[in-house]
Image: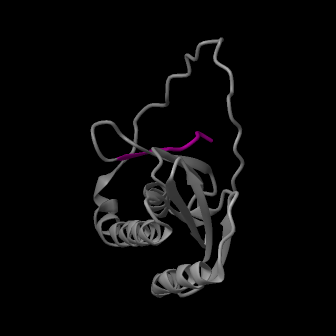
Amino acid sequence: MKVNITGRQLNVFDEMKELIEKKLAKLDKFFPKGATANVVLSSRHGDKIMEITLQSGGTLFRSEVKADSFRNALDGAVSNIERQIRKNKTRLQKHLREQIVFPDTGFDDTAEEDEEILRTKTFSVRPMSPEDAILEMNLLGHDFFLFVNSETGKTCAVYRRNGGGYGLLEPEK
């Protein structure tokens, strides 16, 4: 696993870098093709903050932990990421095929005219199945996910329904 360690307005000593690399090496078993970890250490109002973003094959796992020391923050962040990985590899794959709901109508496009775009974000869209897109959406913690359907070649979106389950939005021909 490739580890990038950054300190915001502080120096990160070699001892701390080695400890971070050692703790993150335990997560290598989940990523046989390799992964990249970005670790950011900062300090605000006496709290030590550690942000870990792990990326592997387009999948992101993220944890931000505040603690009284960087060692405690590291332990909490690694356990959070490990929990995210385990949760999404077991529970979601078992129940995904049962919960997909295909909406029967389109969506309402009655947007108010005074709304403005506050943020623009770009990302890569890659071909995958709707089940994989739902897994990816849950890994990111989002309510919807845009992807290219590998079966139809169309740009689609999956979303979490308020009543439970998932929906798929697919454009007409």
Q: Nearer the viewer, residue 51 or 131?
A: 51
Above or below residue 44? Residue 139 is: below
| Residue 150 seen in render | no
Q: Please identify the quarter of the rendering in which residue 33 is found.
A: bottom right
Q: In which quarter of the image is the N terminus?
A: bottom right
| Residue 14 seen in render | yes
Residue at screen point 58% across, 41% down = 171
Q: What span is colored magenta in the figure? A: 166-173
Q: In which quarter of the image is the C terminus?
A: top right
Above or below residue 25? Residue 36 is: above
Residue at screen point 27% across, 37% down = 163
Residue at screen point 28% across, 58% down = 98
Residue 48 drawn at (x, y percent)? 51, 59
Q: What colouring method underlies this structural image? A: one colour
Q: Is 169 included in the stretch rendered in magenta?
A: yes
In this picture, residue 154 sits left or right of residue 64: right
Residue 99 drawn at (x, y percent)? 30, 53
Q: Please identify the quarter of the rendering in which residue 16 is found.
A: bottom right
Q: How many labels does the image show?
A: 0
Above or below residue 117? Residue 22 is: below
Q: Is 99 included in the stretch rendered in magenta?
A: no
Residue sitting at the far front: 46
Residue at screen point 57% across, 83% down = 21
Q: Nearer the viewer, residue 122 or 52?
A: 52
Residue 151 drawn at (x, y percent)? 56, 62
